[in-house]
Amino acid sequence: MKRMLSGIKPTGRVTLGNYIGAIKPFVSYQDEYEMFIFIANLHSMTIYQEPKELRQNTRDLIALYIAAGLDPDKVTLFLQSDVYEHAQLGWYLGCMVSMGELSRMTQYKDKASKLGKDESIGAGIFNYPSLMNADILLYDPDYVPVGEDQKQHVELCRDIAERFNKRYSETFKIPEPLVSKVGGRIMDLQNPTKKMSKSEETNKGTIYILDDINVSKKKIKSAVTDSDSHIHYDPINKPGISNLLEIYSIISNKSIEDIEKQYDGCGYGVFKTDLAEVVGAELERIQARYKEITTGSYLDDVLAAGAAKARPVARKKLAKVERKIGITIKKR
Ligand code: ATP
Ligand code: LTN
């Protein structure tokens, strides 16, 4: 079995974008790949998190993975902070990347460009990719499934792995980013030229998985589209309706062409009402399962078992790295 690894930050309420771009694809991969999925809680610290909210968001995220269909018996599901090797390898790899390389990362550039006059940027966000490189390289994955916005980080990870292998001999497998063609970038329902984001100030264009289902349905029905009424996929000229078609396609497992045919001649109103039902039914299923698994100690047990499976893999790789770079002084 090929190996796959990915992480998601517990930095806010989980959105339909996260679900379509990250969680749902993981569920579909779990029978085909050996999977390591973790909650990137160390990464979430790059921006201040209110402690109580962080705790709740972290539990919700784990619960949502499972409620969405991820099976903890098949997938190694764990908290990044439970496996100390991530931070340790992150340090070594941070010493191998240049300031120039880090400053070219768009996630960092975006955050830096949005700073207010009196705000400063934390060092953590600048060195964020080093920790991400460690997350990946500790486990030798073949593939790293991510949204479009994270592809650049995985590419940097490949460069650093190659640099390490060249300097110290073959140590890391070179991972491939895996970005879904459909659903890799779900857009804001009110501004379809902008990514649906959990850290958006106005919530009107964002669907939250655990939100009241009627609120979500309303948001879909009032999604911004164009003045035409032809249901056709054309992300450049018709970004609003194209985004809705992608959402429909992923949630219903139908192809975009089939949906276009199904709604040929119907107006946007009918299409949006049906989409609201399709999304509503999916959210209902997830929320019901979420309720079942958030009582008792089930989630803690899943995380303990996940960390126990991840640790030996991470430990072995870190020990290898430390021997190669000369940190370990014992002769074998
Ligand atoms: P923020 O919105 O605050 O920038 P985020 O949701 O992009 O946060 P993460 O929580 O780390 O950041 O994202 C988890 C995964 O979900 C990543 O693989 C990311 O690419 C994917 N993702 C996030 N938003 C979307 C979206 N709108 N469409 C598709 N995938 C998304
Ligand atoms: N940076 C990613 C989250 C993340 C990740 C990873 C994804 C942290 N470490 C390792 C894949 C592999 C994000 O912001 N979505």
Image: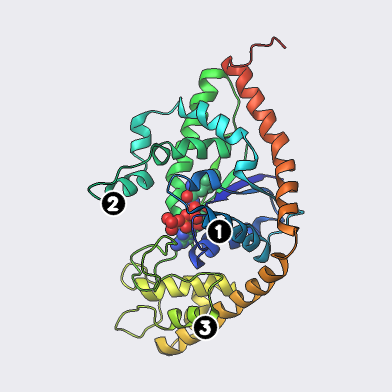
Foreground of the two, 267 or 282: 282
Query: Which residue type does callout 2 highlight?
Result: Lys
Foreground disc of the pair 2, 1:
1
Q: CA distance from mark 3 to mark 1?
A: 22 Å
User: Residue furthest toward the top?
Assistant: 331
Residue at horizontal 70 percent and vertical 43 percent from the top: 307
- The residue identified by callout 2 is 114
Q: Which residue is mark 1?
A: 57
Mark 3 neighbour class, 10 Å CA radius: few under 14, some 14 to 19, many 20 or more? few
Label 1, residues with CA under 10 Å away: few <14, some 14-19, many ≥20: some
Q: Earlier in the sequence, mark 2 or mark 1?
A: 1
Q: Secondary structure at mark 1?
A: helix
Residue at coordinates 42% horizontally, 36% vertically from top-left?
127
Residues under numbered marks 2 and 1 in contact, where contact means CB atoms less than 8 Å apart: no
Residue type highlighted by circle 3:
Asn
Residue 30 in the figure: left or right of residue 182: right
Is residue 134 visible to the viewer in this orientation of the structure? yes
Q: Which residue is mark 3?
A: 214
Q: Quick one: which residue is furthest to the left in this view?
A: 117
Alpha carbons under labels 2 and 1: distance apart: 24 Å
Q: Is residue 193 left or right of residue 89?
A: left
Query: Are there few (<14), some (14-19), or many (20+) residues within 10 Å of tag 2?
Result: few
Sequence-first disc among 3 and 2: 2
Q: Quadrant of residue 278?
A: bottom right
Q: Is residue 35 left or right of residue 16?
A: right
**Residue 179 locus on image (x, y percent):** 50, 53
